[in-house]
Every structure is written in structure tokens, then in C-alpha cells.
Image: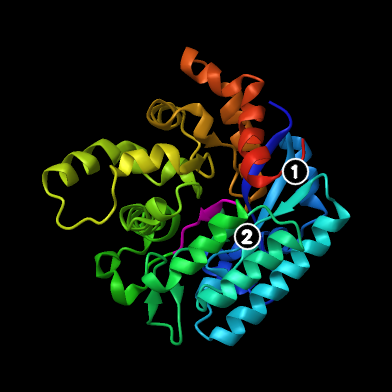
Amino acid sequence: MKNKIALEEHFAIDLTIDQSKIYSQPVVWERLKSNLLDIEQQRLERMDEGGTAFSILSLNSPGIQGIPNVKEAIDVSRRANDILAEHIARHPTKLGGFAALPMQDAEAAARELERCVKTLGFHGFMVNGFSQVGNPETVEYYDAPHFFDFWKNANALGKPFYLHPRDPLPSRAPIYDGFPWLTAATWAFTMETSTHALRLMSSGLFDRNPNLQMILGHLGECIPFNIWRIDNIVAKAPRGIPCKRALGDYFRENVHVTTSGNFRTPSLLSTMLEVSSDRILYAVDYLRSFLMELTAKTYRSLKSPVAVEARRPNRSRNNLALGEIALGLIR
Ligand code: MN
């Protein structure tokens, strides 16, 4: 399948690159580091090899969300977005951008998002989970009331946001004590991100902003597998849940999921049955170059009648459907 649009493809700048070091083995770090910092060399070659026509780039995680100093978060986000915009300007038919935002200051984040969309031409924004604010141990999730105006402004811009994983703070997640192999992408990313997504959905965010679209990676961070059970239990025991509809309604109308980093055909098929192929978008989760070939290979290897749906030419159009409506992408 050619001409794919990939939505979760990361880069780093000098001020954020070291955040990614803990997620790789020392022996491969130097290569990964150069891959993350590189935007225009081997990345474009890998895109061609994997049949990706257009990549929407986003800053590495936790990125801005891991900078407790508010002024620094604002400055670094602006710098990262400006650097990305310069690269996009040199390859406008190949590269697009999701804004990195200083969510530590909701008003500053709203201003930066507007600048990124209206001036830099970005396609939306990516947040890497909660933000550390003021000090490393103070965290904020985006369902809080002081983000209401931010979301209202984001909704008015008509662009989606990508809720991307980060690890929970060790001080708040003792369940991982002594089990470092369960942190990061093994399991902790998924639990942290799916819970944050469920917080946003159940808080009434999409009642207040019904056109807002959230993108989740990794085939929906386990939510498709559990959404029936979630709604079944909430219906029996609402416990003060403030949203107006079943969480599954928001999941099917306000959420898109991507294939990033979860290259398993049975999981893809299950996700397609739950949310429809129209809401599944292509993404690699670019960090290690081999993943791009692996994702493309997974798509080529799909054999079942349902899976054929994912390979039809209009799969690209599905990406473009969101693109044209919400992302404003190239054709
Ligand atoms: Mn990622």
C-alpha cells in the first residue's frame, strides 16, 4: 500500500533528545539519537521504502510535558515548533507537524496552538500525557476546569489532538516498583494513556466540544478491547460520572486510533470490528527505522476478508478523509 499518511512519527531537538535515552539500550542509543534528530535524511528514505508519502511529525515524549518550569516549557515548545516548521517548509509535500504545547500554562498553550495552526500550518497538536507543573512531582491532567477555555479554542480551530503516552511518575505508580520491564511501552504507557483518555471522555469534554477529535495510538491503548465492559459497569454504577453519553459513543464519534507500534493482525481486526476501519489511521511510531518496514509488512500480510478492508485503496482515502476534514492535509 503506497501513499500512506503516517501520524505518529517523532523527532527531537537538542533540548529534548536526552529524554529518550532511557528508552533504548546504550549500544543502539547513538544511532537512535541521530535518527530522532534527523528530519530530512534517512527519515525521508525510510518513508519511501515503507510507502509513506506524508509524515506528520511530533516532538519526542515526554517533551514539553516533562519540563516543570513554566517559562522554560513555553520557550522550548516555541523553539521546537519553529524548528519543525523550517523543515516542513523545505519538504511541504512530505512533512507536516503536530504542535508541541506548554500545557503547564493553559492560556500560553492556546496561544501557541493558534500560532502553530494559523501561522505555521500545523495539523493539530500532540500532548504527551500529563504535564509536570512548577515542580517535578506536581502533575496536571487536561480534564481540569482551568483547561475548559483551552479546549474551546482548540475545538474552534477544527484540528485534532493526539494523546501520546508517557510513563507515570514512579512516586505515583508503586505497582511498577521492582518491575522496570513493565514500564514504558511494555505496559505502563498504555495504562497511563488509556486512563487519561477515559478521564477526558468521562469529564464531559466531548459534550462541551462535540466536534473535537482525539487520536490515540497503539490501536487505541487497549480501550477497544474493554469499552463494552466499561460502559456496562458505568451504566450499573455511575458513581457521579458527569458526561452525558456512554463512553463508547464518544469513542466511536470523537476518537480515531492509529496502528502505531502495535503490529498484530488479531488486535487490528478486533479494533476494526469495534470502531470501524474509517477510524483507524496509519502510523508507525517512528523511532527505530525498522518499525516503518515492519508496519508496512504487517499491512501487506493481512489476509482475512475483513482485513482486506484495511488494504483497499480507500484506506488511503480514509486517512485523507480525516485529513481533508480535520487535518487539512495534502491530497
Ligand atoms: Mn510514539
Q: Residue 74: horizontal and vertical position, in percent?
A: 62, 79
The correct choice, above or below, for 213 with respect to 132 in the image is above
Q: Which of the two discs, 1 and 2, labels the residue nearer the N terminus?
A: 2
The correct choice, above or below, for 188 with respect to 55 in the image is below
In this view of the protein, which residue sits in the foreground, 123 or 205?
205
Q: Residue 51: horizontal and vertical position, in percent?
A: 73, 33
C-alpha gap between disc 1 and disc 2: 18 Å
The 10 Å Cα crowd at callout 1, few under 14, some 14 to 19, many 20 or more, is some
Tell me if label 1 and label 2 are in contact, CB under 8 Å.
no
Q: Is residue 326 visible?
A: yes
Q: Is residue 236 left or right of residue 54?
A: left
Circle 1 sits on which residue?
A: 46
Residue under the image location 51 percent in, 67 percent down:
150
* Secondary structure category for the residue under label 1: helix
Quadrant location of residue 228? top left
Q: Which residues are magenta?
A: 159-166
Give the farthest residue toward the left. Answer: 236
Q: Is residue 161 magenta?
A: yes
Mark 2 residue type? Val
- Callout 2: CB less than 8 Å from ligand 1: no
Residue under the image location 73 percent in, 64 percent down:
37
Q: Quadrant of the N terminus?
A: top right
Q: Quadrant of the C terminus?
A: top right
